[in-house]
């Protein structure tokens, strides 16, 4: 009877030990899977942050190019306005000169 009790106690303790080892393995596997999941989420976040920052950088480069193009076109427009003014002034002065010559020739 004593040996049967010792045997059953040993079987019980072995079962508790194996159950503990199993539950510890399940826990560690869960921790491992959670850490792999969190690593994946972290890497996805780093990737998306990189894509976002690259997009912002490329947008900034694009907008800088648009700005520089606008400045260039504004310069071309202002140069055209200036040259048109010079042309109109020269036409006006030429007209005044020719009018003066005409009046000088016909009045004298």
Image: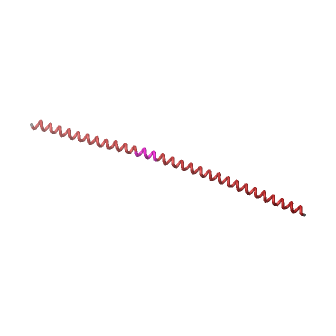
Q: Is residue 55 magenta?
A: no
User: In which quadrant of the rendered image does the C terminus lie?
Assistant: top left
**Figure check: 25 above or below 68:** below
Residue extending furthest toward the top:
105
Residue range of the region highlighted in magenta in the rendering: 60-67
For the point 84% across and 59% down, the residue is 10
For the point 82% across and 60% down, the residue is 12
Decide if residue 73 is on the left or right side of residue 31: left
92 vs 65, nearest the viewer = 65
**Coordinates of residue 30 in the picture (x, y in percent):** 69, 55
Decide if residue 5 is on the left or right side of residue 25: right
**Coordinates of residue 66 in the picture (x, y in percent):** 42, 45
**Coordinates of residue 68 in the picture (x, y in percent):** 40, 44
For the point 59% across and 51% down, the residue is 42
- Which image quadrant is residue 106 in? top left
**Figure check: 100 above or below 15:** above
Q: Main secondary structure of the magenta part?
A: helix
10 vs 68, nearest the viewer = 10
**Coordinates of residue 15 in the picture (x, y in percent):** 80, 58
In the rendered view, how is the structure colored? secondary structure
Decide if residue 12 is on the left or right side of residue 63: right
Residue extending furthest toward the right:
1
User: In which quadrant of the rendered image does the N terminus lie?
Assistant: bottom right
72 vs 105, nearest the viewer = 72
Decide if residue 73 is on the left or right side of residue 28: left
For the point 20% across and 40% down, the residue is 93
Total labels drawn? 0
């Amino acid at each position: 009877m004593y040996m049967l009790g010792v045997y059953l106690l040993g079987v019980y303790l072995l079962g508790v030990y194996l159950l503990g080892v199993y539950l510890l393995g399940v826990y560690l596997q869960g921790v491992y899977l959670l850490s792999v999941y969190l690593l994946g989420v972290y890497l996805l976040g780093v990737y998306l942050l990189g894509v976002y920052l690259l997009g912002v950088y490329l947008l900034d480069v694009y907008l800088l190019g648009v700005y520089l193009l606008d400045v260039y076109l504004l310069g071309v427009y202002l140069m055209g306005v200036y040259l048109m003014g010079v042309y109109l002034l020269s036409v006006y002065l030429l007209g005044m000169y020719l009018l003066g010559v005409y009046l000088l020739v016909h009045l004298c």
